[in-house]
Amino acid sequence: MGWFKNMYKTLRDRRGTEKSISKNDIPTHPISTVSSLMEPCAMALNMDAGRILSIVAEAEAGSTRDLFALYRDVIIVDSHIQSEWTKRKLAVLGDTISVLPFDKKNPADVKTAEAVNEAITGCKAFRMACSHMMDSSLYPISVVEKVYAPVQRGYAIANLIPVPYHLLDWTGGKLQIFDVDPVSGYILSTKHDPDPSRYIVHKGNLLTAPENWGGPMRSILFWWLLSAMSREWWARFLDRYGSPFLVGKFADDEGKNLLERAFSLATRLGGIVCSRDTSIEIQKVSSNDSGDAYDKFLSICQREKSKLIIGQTLSAEAQPTGLGSGVSSLQGAVRDDIRKFDAMMLSDTLIHQLITQFCQINNLPGRIPKLVWGSQSNEDIKAMGSLLQSFAVAGMELSDAGITQMAENTGYSLQRKAASQSPTPFNSPNTSISKIILESESRENAVIRLNAAFPSIDRLQIQSMIDDFMRGAL
C-alpha cells in the first residue's frame, strides 16, 4: 500500500510541472456490481461452536466467504450489536466534513480545496461509501470502488460503490477480488488484484493480525452465540417448568399405573380422576432465581460486545457507579477517543486514496487539502475556551497558525476578531491590569479599581483575573 504515499508526496511537492495521468487509468465504469442472487445464504441458522471453529479455520486458510456471511447475519439478527455499531458510525458520520486548504493564504490551495469540496458534495453516494468504509472497525478491511465521470473541465466523482465482502478472497496469499460478469452480475471464478486507481482499501482497526483471520469482529462471535443460545435455553426452561405441573403419590404399582393413565388424559380433559387414597399435588417452580441468572448472563454477553464496539457500556444500559465515582466521565472519554480515531483513519484514507487521485486527474494547481471530519467534544471545546481566556489575561493570543489548528480541531471556521475601539483589559492604551493589581493596597482595593476601570466586566470575572495574575506571578 505504499503507492499512495509516493503519490501524495509527489503532489504535495509539485510546482505545476507534472502531466496528467493517462485516461486509460481513470475508471469510468463499475466492474464490481453483483446480482443480489449471488448473496451467500444465511449462516446463523443452527449455528454451534463447532461450526464457528470450522468457519474460522477456513478463513485462516484464505477463504473468508462463510466468515463474512456469518458476520453479516450476526449484525442483522443481534439488535444489541446493530445498535452499538450504529452509535459508533453516527458519532463520525453525524458530524460535518470540512475541506480546508493546505495554505489558506495561497490562492491555488484555496481553489483546490473548493474543487474537492464541490466534488464530495456532488457525490450522492459519498456518505454511504464512508459508512461501508467504517465497517472495517469490526471487519478486517473494507473496499470501495471509485467511478469517475467526464465533465466539462475534467472528471467528477460519479459514484463510490461498496464492494461486497463475499467478493474478497485471500486463498492466493494476498487480497484479491473476484471478477463479476458485467451483464448478469454473476460472480466468476477468476480474480484480480485491487488496483489503487480503481479501489479504496480502508482499514479502520489497529490489529496487526492477517486480514483473513477475521478482524476485531471475530472476538465477539462466541459472545453472540452464547447470548443467542441463552434465549433458547430460557425458552426451553419456561416451556418445561414455567407452568404448574402435577405431582402424584401412590402406594403400590396399581396406583402408579392409574396415575400415569390419569396424567396422560389430564392435558386433554383439563382435570383428573383418582381414588381417595391417591395423593396429587400441583407444584410450580419459582422462576425468580432462574430469571435473575438468565438476566445476569445475558448482560455479561451484551457488555462484552459493547466494550469491543464502543469501548464502554454505560450508553447501552443503566449501571450504578456510585456518587462522584467518575466512571461515566472516564467511559465517555474512551468513547470520544474511539470517535477521534475513526475520523482520523477515515480522513487519511480519503485523502490518500481518493482526493489525491482526484486532484491529479484534474490537474488542480494547489497542494492536497486537509480533510477534517467532525470536531472536538463539547468538554474539550469548553476547556479550550477557558484556556484562551487565561492566555488573554496573561497578555498572550493565538498566532495565525494556532487559529488554523483550532479551526481544524473544533470544525468551525475561525478568524481573528477586529480590534475594539472601547477600552478593554486587553487593548486599553493607558490602563494595565497588572499595574492596577500591583499598585492596589489590598485585594478588595484591586477589585474596586478594576471594576471602575472596566465597568463592563462583572466582579466574578475580575476575581478570576486577579487569581490568574497571582498564579502567574508565583
Image: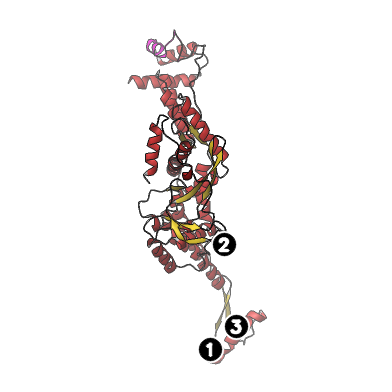
Return the disc, 3 or 1, that comes first in the chain's sequence.
1
Residue under label 1, please give it.
251
The residue mark sitting in front, 3 or 2, is: 2
The residues colored magenta run 423-439
Residue under label 3, please give it.
263
The numbered dot on residue 240 is: none
Q: Going 40% across and 22% down the picture, which residue do you hit?
A: 468
In the rendered image, residue 81, in percent from the top left (x then y), is placed at: 50, 54
Return the disc, 2 or 1, that comes first in the chain's sequence.
2
In the rendered image, residue 322, in percent from the top left (x then y), is placed at: 45, 46
Q: 10 Å neighbourhood of mark 1: few (<14), some, or many (≥20)?
A: few
Nearer-the-camera pick, 139 or 315: 139
In the rendered image, residue 307, in percent from the top left (x then y), is placed at: 44, 51
Q: Amino acid at mark 3?
A: Phe
Nearer-the-camera pick, 190 or 412: 190
Residue under label 2, please give it.
37
